[in-house]
Image: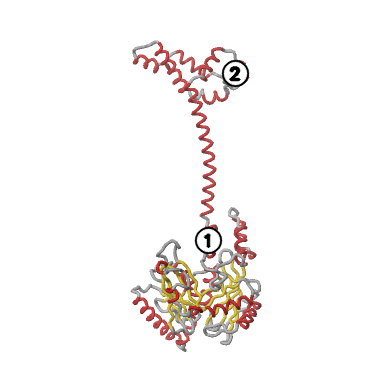
Amino acid sequence: MKIDPLFLEKYIIATRVKVFDYLASISEKRIQRNKSKDSKNSLFLIKNISKTEKYQKIIERIKNFNINDESKYKSSKSKNSGSFINEIISSSNYQKLIFQINKFKKKKVEQKKSKKNNKRVSLKKKVAGNGNFKNIIYQINQFRVKLNIPFNLQKNYFIKSLIPNYKINIQLFEGFKKYRLFNKDSLLKRKNNKKFDQKIGIIFYSDHNIIFISLNINLNNRININGVTEIPIPGNVIGDTLVEDSNELANIVLDSINLLDLNTAPLLVVLSSSFFNIHTFKASDLKQISLSDRKVQSKSPYLADNTLVDFLRMSDPQISNGFVRTTYSQKDFIKGWTDTLEMIDLPVIGLVPAAPLIFDAITKTTLEEKTILIDIELKVTTLLIGGELSELNSHKLPFGSSLYISTNLKDSGKNYFDRVLNSIKIIMNNNNDKLPSNIFVMGSGLDNLINSESPLPKGFKSIAELKLSDFSYSPKTMQIHELLSNSIGSRIFSLASILTSCV
């Protein structure tokens, strides 16, 4: 067996105690061979070997053993030295020492690998904890959730989920692919780079008026509104309950699209809440989640053949006592809009009711057991009452802001909100529910009832105060800002929040 001189220099000289153990074991064996009957004397001899002259000479030989010069070591003919080294090599204690050294070396290698892995894990944790990274992951997860909405896109046009071939989604995913997690400078440039912004058009219909909005949205859902126009729609184009002339409606929409330069932008169509009815069922109460279920049919305000229903589970599908939200709409009315959109032939993000998306956004920011949202229109007030991931039901109140408009805005607002509050109390008392601390308000009629000098009464809160979206709206800087209404401030807040919920 060959010995590496450097190995001996490092380990044998540094482990004199091991050599002592070895010498002690040799002495013990010799004592046993002499058949010594006095075990105490044997132990005494073993313990006192270190005091003998022979042991001291061996230690001196180990200390003075020069193995820096490998050639001298190899050419050494000293029988005593060779015998001494061979004796150490062949000993069991030496083999144990070699085993321990190899074990130590292996442990060190594993520790180095472990440190590298720990550095990688800590780096991953650091990246995962980064707010920008979390925001991107949040957007991806939101997108995936929307893709899993359980309804047939070929048959149901209303409340479409985001589809991969829509340009807005391609734009977002291209941004995700090019996102550099470890390059802060590159990330900062992308945040501020306008080429990553997506242009979007919003169409909002309510009270025989259509509002068109042109805006840009970046990867952080920051919205910049750059154009607004409002157009009156005659009754022969859209009636009270139906789209009477899809061709004429398509021409009106195309004119505004050209005016706002939205010819290649995806569109989000938002319809007023009065065209929809919402009811929530317990999943265990339904035999099947479809319009053919009798309980589902019983809550529709329209004839079965003219009813379009969208279903949304409000909890885990595997939980039998979860909730299923049903949104009812008149099929002929929705078909009139989808026919119009087919003529326009632009990508569509979705066709959605105004209030439910706002309601869901509010419940994420409040801790109330029950949340109340009222959507004020000119002739109708839609009342939504429910909770987060639980029951949500809509109620139609047969009055709007137009009934209370007068020269005295302070009295107008007070009279309207007093009546709304009485209606809410009746509904809450019938259900044995407590009135929440705030009732949230939105809608096209809100601007007719309040201003800076006549704010909302106590107990009512505008959704503008919740900051549900991040947007900029500066009419003075816009080239196109044409309105029929005195103000559309409340609708701008609503539409920006709805867009944030959709994308």
Image quadrant containing the N terminus:
top right
Dividing the picture into quarters, in which one does residue 249 lie? bottom right
Among all residues in the image, which is located at the extreme bottom?
407
Q: Residues within 10 Å of mark 2 (few under 14, many from 20)?
A: some
Among all residues in the image, which is located at the extreme top?
34
SS class, disc 1: helix
Residue 437 is marked as: none
Total residue callouts: 2
Answer above or below: position of 421 versus 69.
Answer: below
In the rendered structure, the answer to whether residue 86 lies left or right of residue 263 reads: left
Residue 16 locus on image (x, y percent): 47, 22
Residue 53 locus on image (x, y percent): 45, 13
In the rendered structure, the answer to whether residue 371 lies left or right of residue 186 reads: left
Front residue of 150 and 92: 150
SS class, disc 2: helix
Image quadrant containing the C terminus:
bottom right
| Residue sitting at x 51%, y 29% | 101
Q: Amino acid at mark 1?
A: Asn
Front residue of 454 and 9: 9
Residue named by callout 2: 73
| Residue sitting at x 45%, y 66% | 314
Q: Residues within 10 Å of mark 1 (few under 14, many from 20)?
A: few
Decide which of tag 1 and tag 2 comes sooner along the chain.
2
Residue named by callout 1: 141
Answer above or below: position of 33 versus 503.
Answer: above
Q: Amino acid at mark 2?
A: Tyr
Residue 389 locus on image (x, y percent): 43, 66
| Residue sitting at x 51%, y 54% | 129
Residue 254 locus on image (x, y percent): 64, 79
| Marks 1, 2: nearer the viewer | 1
